[in-house]
Image (cartoon, helix red, strand yellow):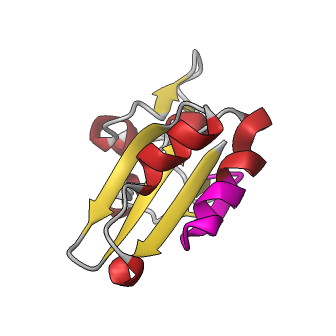
């Protein structure tokens, strides 16, 4: 399960992810991170069975945690299957099927937003 974690460093500069891994024993995959001097946002992936445990521990440390069921949506009426999203996506979320229609594997998405910017018909939207 993907979790979007945002935090403020007003409470200190503790390593939230490392402490959470150590205390829960759950391996956390960091997929994207934007860290600034006083705040940050991290997209992590954890096993579904451990998501509640990780969420609770991160919230205990003062972080805001949002569970992401989906990452990007496609308006099939607007999509013309041009493939621009395929060419720009660094995570290979998009592909053509045997009929040359766009397919999506949203589990790979890291919410970079490049596809939404590149789509000439505005058929893609981030859901976070």
Between residue 62 and residue 89, name the one nearer to us. Answer: 62
Q: Residue at x 29, y 62 (%)?
A: 34
- Please provide percent x and percent y for residue 28: 51, 36
Q: Residue at x 68, y 32 (%)?
A: 47
| Relative side of 21 to 90, left or right | right
Residue 35 inside the magenta-drawn segment? no
Between residue 11 and residue 111, name the one nearer to us. Answer: 11
Q: In this view, does 120 lie above or below 18?
A: below
Between residue 9 and residue 94, name the one nearer to us. Answer: 9
Q: Which residue is drawn at 64% across and 56% down?
A: 57
- Please provide percent x and percent y for residue 101: 57, 31
- Please provide percent x and percent y for residue 84: 34, 44
Magenta range is 55-71
Q: In this view, does 121 lie above or below 45?
A: below
Residue 62 inside the magenta-drawn segment? yes
**Quadrant where the image shows the C terminus:** bottom right
| Relative side of 70 to 96, left or right | right
What is the quadrant of residue 41 in the picture?
bottom left
Q: Confirm whether residue 81 shows in the render.
A: yes
Marker count (numbered): 0
What is the quadrant of residue 121 in the picture?
bottom left
Between residue 47 and residue 16, name the one nearer to us. Answer: 16
- Please provide percent x and percent y for residue 111: 44, 54
**Farthest bottom residue in view:** 10
**Quadrant where the image shows the N terminus:** top right
């Amino acid at each position: 399960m993907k979790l979007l974690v945002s935090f403020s460093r007003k409470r200190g500069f503790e390593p939230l992810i490392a402490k959470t891994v150590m205390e829960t024993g759950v391996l956390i995959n960091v997929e994207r991170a934007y860290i600034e001097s006083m705040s940050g946002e991290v997209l992590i992936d954890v096993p579904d069975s451990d998501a509640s445990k990780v969420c609770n521990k991160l919230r205990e440390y003062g972080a805001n945690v949002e569970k992401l069921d989906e990452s990007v949506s496609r308006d099939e009426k607007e999509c013309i299957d041009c493939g621009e999203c395929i060419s720009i996506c660094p995570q290979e979320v998009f592909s053509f099927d045997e009929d040359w229609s766009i397919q999506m594997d949203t589990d790979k998405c890291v919410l970079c937003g490049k596809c939404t910017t590149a789509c000439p018909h505005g058929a893609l939207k981030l859901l976070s």
